[in-house]
Amino acid sequence: MSAQITLQPSGHVFHADDGESVLEAALREGYRLPYGCRNGTCGSCKGRVASGVVDHGKSQDTALPAAERAQGMALFCQAQPRSDLVIECREIGTVKDIPVKTLPCRVQSLELVAPDVMRIRLRLPAAERLQFLAGQYIDILLRDGTRRSLSLANPPHDDGLLELHLRNYGGPFSIHVFTQMKEKDILRFEGPLGTFYLRENSDKPVVLVAGGTGFAPIKAIIEHAIHHNIKRPLLLYRGARRAADLYLNELPLTWQREHGITYIPVLSDVTTEDAWNGRSGLVHEAVIADLPDLSGHDVYACGAPAMIDAARRDFLTRCGLPETAFYADAFTPAVP
């Protein structure tokens, strides 16, 4: 039996299934409530139950003292409805609402998904979770004081592990990852960072342009949209040099087959070895060929700075895309 939950002051209404916490139900239905650990110890998800009854679950006294419980406060990551509820809690509306943290993490797995691309999965401490928007990135903090920015490839609802895609450009961190890093190594990072994320207050069709490992945040955005049943048309144009560079290619093919997402891979340096019968050339030129009028679209582009610059220039001047409808994240490698 589901419970109806009304969120104040926004007035949003959602439903929790049996066994679901308030936070789980809210995230499932697309409402972003603040959270941290998701296990009842940090207090980041604390809010007030204005009416109704909850089971406080495993809420820790250090995060929710008895006096606060008596005043109607609850940790929404643990609180399960026992009736319809009216709750008071702020919602995450923009990047500025999400706290930036510095956290340790452990390398859970390393997977070579292309000759020069490593998929890294990181596990946070048991008492921590990272709240972020699909498309944001983190900075790996290196021992020499430098940073390596990497986009999160997993969507926010799938936050048990953090997923990163790293291309080996020959920089110090890349060399370390590809030659020395091993499972269970400890890293530190700061995040989430960046303003590249899906604006959900628009109903325009979305064109996503991914070059190289710019596929990582685009993957997160698409998986977020699928999870939340966002109905806007999604068109993914993916650029790579060679067919071998289209790593994890079965994923977008699955999105296309099962969710109706248009997927158009484009290779810039095709050779006979590729046995390629798809599109070739520059990925943003493929967009222009298919969509000469972009005035009614939103565009999200991620990849090398040259690709971003060309896409921005040509989409705005040749296709009528409003500048406010172009969102971009340029990947700058540590070594040119």
Image (spheres, grey):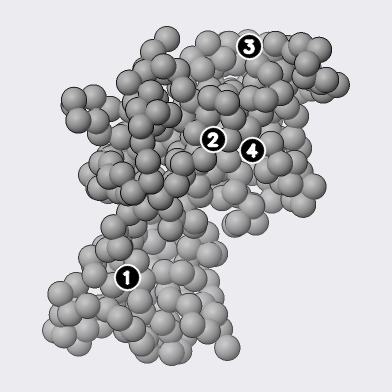
**Contact, CB < 8 Å: mark 2 with mark 4?**
no
* SS at mark 3 in the image: helix
Q: Dot 1: few (<14), some (14–19), or many (≥20) neighbours within 10 Å?
A: many
At label 4, the amino acid type is: Leu
**Contact, CB < 8 Å: mark 4 with mark 3?**
no
Q: Name the residue under label 3.
A: 314
Looking at this view, is 224 or 147 the one in front? 147
Of callouts 4 and 1, the N-terminal one: 1
Please state which of the two labelled residues, at mark 2 or mark 4, is closer to the viewer. Answer: 2
Please state which of the two labelled residues, at mark 2 or mark 3, is closer to the viewer. Answer: 2
Q: Name the residue under label 2.
A: 112
Q: Mark 4 points at which residue?
A: 248
Of callouts 1 and 2, the N-terminal one: 1
At label 3, the amino acid type is: Asp
Q: How far apart are marks 1 and 2 (CA)?
A: 32 Å
Residue 140: image quadrant is top left
Q: Height in image: 190 above or below 8?
A: above
The percent position of residue 58, horizontal first and vertical second, equals 30, 81
Q: Dot 3: few (<14), some (14–19), or many (≥20) neighbours within 10 Å?
A: some
Q: How far apart are marks 4 and 1 (CA)?
A: 32 Å
Of callouts 4 and 3, the N-terminal one: 4
Please state which of the two labelled residues, at mark 1 or mark 2, is closer to the viewer. Answer: 2
Residue at 42%, 74% in the rendered image: 22
Please state which of the two labelled residues, at mark 3 or mark 1, is closer to the viewer. Answer: 1
* SS at mark 1 in the image: loop
Q: Dot 4: few (<14), some (14–19), or many (≥20) neighbours within 10 Å?
A: few
**Contact, CB < 8 Å: mark 2 with mark 3?**
no
Residue at 52%, 40% in the rendered image: 111
The circle drawn on residue 304 is none
